[in-house]
Amino acid sequence: MNLREYVIQHEVAIRLGLFFSILLIMTLWELVAPRRRLTVSKPLRWINNLGMVCFNSLLLRLIFPTAAVGMAVFVQKHEWGFFNHFPVLYGFAVIVSVVAMDFVIYLQHVMSHAIPVFWRIHRTHHADLDFDVTTGVRFHPFEIILSMLIKFGAIAVIGAPVLSVVIFEVLLNATSMFNHGNVRIMHSLDRVLRWIVVTPEMHRVHHSSLYYETNSNFGFNLPLWDRFLGTYRDQPRMGHESMTIGIENLRDIKHCVILPGMLVIPFIGKIAGYTIDHRK
């Protein structure tokens, strides 16, 4: 069995192993070198944020038993998509597919801020009152399902190889936890890293309570989309220690921290002021 076959066959075990490994690394890093002082009980937030992860994982397995990798196998079998009609070197197809899927997720993220109904759903992620590794995996079930359907469409159009989908899913999960970390990175190192990967210093700006900062730095894996498409913002106006995390008009513990309240966020409150509007 070659490496490609091994990765595909053990995809679930690899993803789970890397998830818990990255979570452990980021947790220790946050304890040793925190960037900000947390404002809400960490155990309370973690129980509910990770509870959301467990709920979403079970829901996905019920609705999409084979998830994105299963879609890639189906696409390959039926020869759908670009790379199944225009044969190229396998390694090239894998790399381009990973980059293309990352761009699709960037566009989905922008869409989540541009279309009111999608912003209502995405608010569950932004309503976290603190910013740490668990924020990176806290999404409403509706958004998880929508994201999976968008991935299915991207995989079908691209004809993404199965290995590229495994790599992308692992990267997306790992970088989401990394760039939501409440960790301190040397300024000089961050300046270099943010040309290669979205860093916590870069993505934290996106979680500002100020709408014009929230509507920037949409990338998860690659920072080039923000830089090339004009959505990049270097630093928060108030500085990283003083900036307010979350949504201005959604601050109650019941909805921002407690799991049942998080689930009803799409159905409550007004959304004016946060959806992208270039007239502002």
Image (tube, helix red, strand yellow):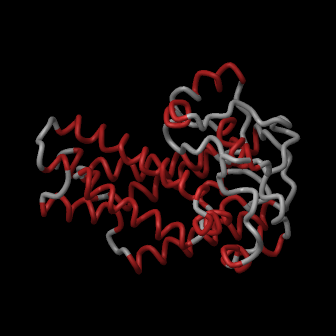
In-image side of 38 versus 78 (left or right): right
Q: Residue at x 23, y 44 (%)?
A: 3
In-image side of 154 versus 139 (left or right): left
Q: Position of residue 26 (x, y in %)?
A: 64, 45
Please, is residue 149 above or below residue 86 in the view? below
Q: Residue furthest front?
A: 279
Q: Residue at x 37, y 40 (%)?
A: 99
Please, is residue 9 above or below residue 55 in the view? above
Please, is residue 107 above or below residue 75 in the view? above
Q: Position of residue 63 (x, y in %)?
A: 40, 79
Q: Residue at x 49, y 55 (%)?
A: 108
Disc tally is: 0
Relative depth, front residue between 273 and 21: 273
Q: Position of residue 184 (x, y in %)?
A: 74, 34
Q: Position of residue 110 (x, y in %)?
A: 55, 51
In-image side of 37 versus 73 (left or right): right
Q: Residue at x 83, y 58 (%)?
A: 248
Relative depth, front residue between 130 and 41: 130
Q: Quadrant of residue 149?
A: bottom left
Please, is residue 9 above or below residue 67 in the view? above
